[in-house]
Image (cartoon, coloured by chain):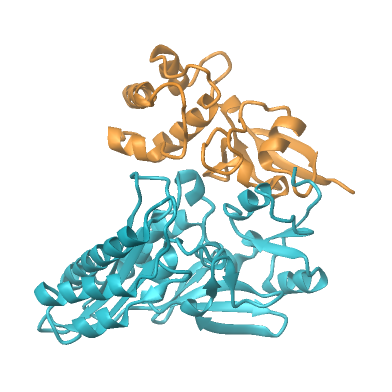
Amino acid sequence: MSRVHVTCTINGDPAEFLCDGGQTLLDALRDEAGLTGAKEGCGTGDCGACSVVMDGRLLCSCLVLAPEAEGATISTVEGMAAGDDLHPLQQCFLEGAALQCGVCTPGFLVAAKALLDRNPDPTETEVRYGLAGNLCRCTGYDKIVRSVLAAAQTVNES
Amino acid sequence: MLSAMKYASPTTVAEAVDLLGAEPDARVYAGATDLIPQIRAGRPEPAVMVDLKRIERLCAIARRGSTYTVGAATPTADICAHDGLAAAFPGLVEASGLIGSDQIQSRSSWGGNLANASPAADTPPSLIVNEARAVIAGPAGERTVAASAVATGPGATSLSGGEFIVEFELDEPPARTADAYLRLIPRTEMDIAVVGAAARITLDAAGTVAAAAVALGAVAPTVVRVPDAEVALIGRRPSGDALVAVEAAAAAAANPIDDKRGTAAYRRQVAGVLARRAVAIAAERASQPGEQS
């Protein structure tokens, strides 16, 4: 069966890959584009480990068919740091010990960045609701929430 | 997985109709937030996945005269960000915002929520109390039906082969009219309704109810209208005995099942409570000129 050729922009760079019609964007990012930051947790849109931003919308890449990415602009966790300089969210996650096993972390970072892009100064409640689509089975969430609030403060002070 | 399917992305309604006509085993989708998990859980893969989101009409929100049209694949995130819809249909917009996480909000749609025909779907009760109409395209052209006529049972609809929902039409509500939607879930986010209740109330200048609509979700195979509650409200103030009657009528109209989310008896009781509260909220909103669009 012929594969689908997709041309898009990933983390600011032009990208192209071949995928199957029924392949998910998550699988195409990982297996065709070599970007393994986004993780498969549940595969049903519940856990958020596969979160990416496509055309300005935060979504679960496990629920997107890869051919939908034609012409799209995609941001993944790999695009968050500027070279060796971590994004404030990444730095605050490190300093706040907001991860243990780390499988959920890329999704939390992408979702938290989408949240701060939309709401640069969220309350704790807004952070908890904003990240309700991301599950973590290690941390108990508190360190994640505090790290996102700390990152918001860092971004707003800089 | 999922790799045997073909992908198609028509850009016009006519092209989508032709695609569905040519391949009976094609499935339309908007956000696929229900469809992909269903396929992963073992439902047969369709031969072709027809992505409706590249059709402009399917993702557009417009107002023509006194009628809003909302594309069936419009992400609920866009619906929640639309000031006109939020002012005219606050309950329907709240129901839309309750579907899943921010990630799901980027993909979930009224068309998918209605056509997936889950008894627990959040937006159908609110679409129904607002008398939304679904414009349906198919091989015979377009037809318009009441949103209440689409779902016929769990996972079943009145759409025939090759048909899909293009858009919804909603008439601007009359003066002193507002709606509300409440649902019960065991946690505060990311769950499926144990019970949902939508109400729309129109008050007259004296503050008595001139028109009422009450509908329940998750307590029967399809959305349940509660005509006894509507009759009990009309001509009375939306308080006191009238609300007691609403609660009793809603509990009586509910026909729920026992499942892991709640017992039938619990659901019946909650249906009454949520209907009463939804009516009270809708009536309060209807009494405030600021809530009118």
In front here: A9 or B281?
Answer: B281
The answer to whether residue B1 is visible is yes
Chain shaded cyan: B
Above or below residue B227? Residue A84 is: above
Q: Position of residue B61 (x, y in %)?
A: 48, 67
Residue A158 quadrant: top left
Q: Position of residue B292 (x, y in %)?
A: 24, 72
- Residue A105 falls left or right of residue A36: left
Residue at horizontal 59%, vertical 78%? B158
Pick out the residue farthest to the right: A1
Q: Position of residue A78 (x, y in %)?
A: 60, 25
Q: Position of residue B98 (x, y in %)?
A: 39, 54
Residue at horizontal 61%, vertical 46%? A63
Above or below residue B95? Residue A19 is: above
Above or below residue A107? Residue B179 is: below
Residue B173 quadrant: bottom left
Residue B201 quadrant: bottom left
The answer to whether residue A119 is visible is no
Residue at horizontal 61%, vertical 30%? A39
Residue at horizontal 54%, vertical 27%? A106
Chain shaded orange: A
